[in-house]
Amino acid sequence: MIIGVTGGIASGKSTVAHAFAARGVPFVDADDVAREVVEPGEPALAEIAAHFGPRVLRDDGQLDRRALRAIVFAEPDQRRWLESVTHPRIRERIQHHLARLQADGAPYVLLVSPLLFESGQWRLTDRTLVVDVPEAMQIRRTAARDDIDTAQAQAIVAAQMSRDERLARADDVIDNSGPHDAMLEQVARLDQQYRQGES
Ligand code: ADP
């Protein structure tokens, strides 16, 4: 069984994933995979460099993410092109990592992705788990963790899928607005449910 874990910025996806991992349930982080597929030597990076030219490469041959972000932010067609190159490879690599963890004997596995619903990655999963906190708390935790001001954190939250929509699409929800221990209790309960293969 594959559980898709998502939530808005600073909702606690990573914290929850580590709580499952401490109970012997491994996870694949979609953000890590997105970085993996554009590492030097990867075909996607070669295609991107051929398409956009050396302005998207740093001196050490790594992708210049900031330069690429600036280009695709201004040009939606280019963003679509970039996604047509990266998304299939990200999906393929996620499936590869998940399959390996399952073959290694994991009771079940997690796919942690901030864009689980938006990217269609939820289709790779059997159930979805949303980590939920009120927006005001999300903004506070984002500002504190990433050392940005409240207005910047607010803008990031406003640009994401709404809390209501995310909750409407969730099979399961962890309320992470309380203390750490309260989150751990919910993880323990869901872990028991998932191990029994309950849906
Ligand atoms: P995400 O992966 O969803 O962006 P994180 O797991 O990084 O979110 O959590 C965001 C921030 O909030 C981190 O600094 C984390 O330590 C903190 N945090 C997570 N859960 C709690 C909690 N229950 N109480 C207080 N702080 C929390």
Image (cartoon, rainbow, N blue to C red):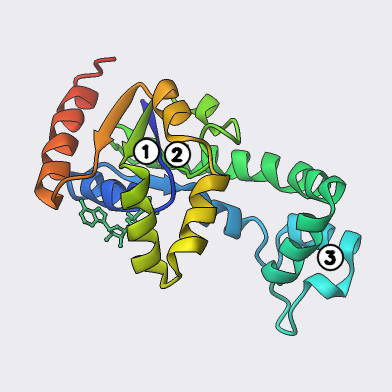
The percent coordinates of residue 144 (x first, y second) are 34, 67
Disc 2 CB within 8 Å of nearest ligand 1 atom: no
Name the residue tied to disc 3.
Answer: 49
Residue shown at the point (41%, 41%) measured from the top left: 7
Residue at (54, 25) in percent of width and height: 123
Image position of 4 (left or right of 185): right
Q: Amino acid at mark 3?
A: Ala
The residue carrying mark 2 is 98
Q: Kindly identify the amino acid type of the residue bearing the numbered disc 1.
A: Leu
Asked if the beta carbon under badge 1 is closer than 8 A to the nearest atom of ligand 1, the reply is no
Task: Between label 1 and label 2, give the one nearer the viewer.
Answer: 1
Quarter of image, res 102 = top left
Q: What is the three-letter code of the residue carrying label 2?
A: Leu
Q: Rounded to the nearest whole Å, what is the CA distance between mark 3 and mark 1?
A: 32 Å
Residue assigned mark 1? 110
Total tally of numbered discs in the picture = 3
Q: Where in the figure is residue 99, as x and y percent of width and height? A: 46, 36
For residue 107, say whether it is visible: no
